[in-house]
Image: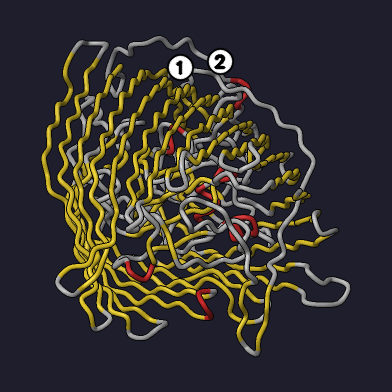
Amino acid sequence: MPQVSLRVSLLASVVLVSPLVAEEDITELAPILVEASDGVATEGTGSYSTERATVGGRQPVDIRDIPQSITVVTDERLEDANANSLEEAAFVLPNLTTALGDVYTGSLYSRGHEVFTYNIDGAPRPFLSIYGTAPDLVFFDRVELLSGPSGVYQGTGEPVGTLNLVRKRPTSTPQGRASVATGSFDALRGEFDYSAPLNAEATVRGRIIAYADTKNSYVDFVESDREGLSGTLDVDLTDQTLLSFGFIAETQDALRFSGLPTFTDGTLLDVPRETFIGADWNRFESDSIEGFTELEHRFDNGSVLKASARRYSRDVVIRSVLPNSAVDPLSGDFDLLTFARDFEEDTDFVDVNWSSPISAFGTTGEVTLGADYRSTDQTMRQNFDFSAGTQNINTFDPTAIAEPVITFPGIGPGFRLNTLTETQEYGIYAQGRIDLGVRTKLSVGTRYVLYDSRVRDTGRDLIRSDIEEQRFVSNIGLAYALNDRLTAYGGYSDIFQPQIEQRADGSQLDPVEGRQFEVGLKGSFNGGSLTTQTAVFYIEDRNRAVEDPANPGAFLDSGDATTKGFEALLQGFVGQNWMVSGGYTYVDTDRDDDPTSPHTLSLWGRYTVPEGRLQGADLGIGLRYASSFSLGTIKAPSYVVIDAMARYPITETLSAQLSVENLLDGTYYTRVNQTTRGNFYGTPRRLTLGITMRF
């Protein structure tokens, strides 16, 4: 596939101070024209809240009409949090948790389950932290999270949550943004974003976004260089027909860290946070590119016909020295292995759908009908080397380990395989929302899926697994408007998700199956500038992929499991010049592979100085709390992290922002995994100073 090599050296940039209009005790946003074809863009609104999202349908939908929990992290909230990745965005939400997989990226968990899929504009992609994270968030307007199953629209359906990244779109008036930031651990980042019409009539519009990001880490030897570029063209073929096409390309070159081992009894190591277990030649190389085309036509009666096609390709090379045993508490000895994997993936996705208002039998509503196709080819080559042997935690030297010569295919015991996985999925879906009167809306959806996946061991010329599935996946729910501000809802959803993960013998895991029940209450106040959500959920599922502790890179089927919990969220303006974002989540699961805390709390507040010498400055502070958590015999204590930011408008177009993560420099473990590896300290105090210019 094409190699991506970019280097952006940029000058810098701003933050849009939220323009407010205060009337008595109600704070409202000043009118701002935001141009985007989906009608729900958050860029330029200056708000933490929004009342609409696209994750609940193929067209923008009122969040209160969806009988499931939906949370949106807006462009303003991402900027205030200095969040450039999904993992960093997850720190903002109490119902989404990051469990580190290296210092920079990690697994995401929602409702006690790992999230293995994310979407870009509704098109699904696999999300396995071993291959690196999702695209940089500089390309996106917002992050949408639909909690719970979503099998009607999102492929076969992530059982516990659908993450949808919504692209920034070209605008009909020129606008630009450039920024540069530097900070702790030799971090340096530059961004450039420019959008403009390309003809006098503004019927052809373009947008180009680029970034370069380099940084070291609080862990010795660990470093990362990432670069990316995207381009988009929107063409109005007619007043009602829009053609959009473009690409996103990224590359990463990193020296990764697989976490610390524990002592043999599961006790966490009390070593300095900078301790690195690996070799100074560890490497992770990733190149990815996605091309997309969308065609949308709006009819006079309000219906919309939309067709989209995407192709995504990536290449990954991994060479890592990993701990392969726990640390003996008496001698300090532990074993190492060298893990090597080459991975290639090509995914095609096509979707055609029609959405329309309906009126029949004295009632109104909306209906969506569609069909999609997804094809994925994955080539993996994997082998191990044990020549690094036994080491000692007290005298370990990462520079003293020689790099072995590793060849493919791997021969011998363990997960040493060359495999080709070919997957195809055909789906037909329908979703309807009907106004039953008495302020009640019924939501019903179903999907018929044909799924076929074959894994072939190319080194031994064997068929490891051949899975064929046909299934209906459905949901049903009611939303009842208690008044103009509050809506109560209840819903049921099926869970069915074939899995691409493999067992140690190369065979593919069985599909995840189950169901979810959810009831909740959604609120919208102050003209939509403040939104609230509460939800109670109960999930039953089986066959979920869990890491195989005896075979790095392989997975096992989990047994039957039940998960229940409660979520409460608050986003938006709570008073004049005050915005908040946060909430609380409780998860109780009998799954034995959930490394997250049962209780999590996230609170953030931002105050905009209304007058005086600091007029227009933004001051923000917040906390993240996680109760004690465990996995097997490994237990970690609870922790609280304080974050803060300050932003000052130097001129109308230029601003400076200082962000501080872990203000009090607390020492804590943020993830536990296995006695052999995967246990991570949280990030020490980290400062980032950025300058932003808008033009």
Label 2: which residue?
Answer: 402
Q: Secondary structure at mark 1?
A: loop
Q: Amino acid at mark 2?
A: Ala
Looking at the image, which residue is at 51% across and 33% down?
246
| Relative to 211, residue 581 above or below | below
Which residue lies under the disc numbered 1? 387
The 10 Å Cα crowd at callout 2, few under 14, some 14 to 19, many 20 or more, is few
Image side of residue 551 versus residue 193, left or right? left
Q: Nearer the viewer, residue 360 or 2?
A: 360
Q: Residue furthest bottom?
A: 24
* 575 horizontally vs 114: left or right: right
Give the number of the disc on residue 334. none
Q: Nearer the viewer, residue 394 or 234?
A: 234
Answer few, some or many: residues within 10 Å of disc 1's Cα (few below 14, many 20 plus, some between 14 and 19): few
The residue depicted at 42 percent of the width and 78 percent of the height is 523
Q: Amino acid at mark 1?
A: Ser
Residue 466 position (above or below residue 181): above
Looking at the picture, how far across and down is residue 576, in whole percent?
66, 81
Q: Is residue 328 visible?
A: no
In the picture, measured across the screen, residue 599 lies left or right of residue 277, that is left
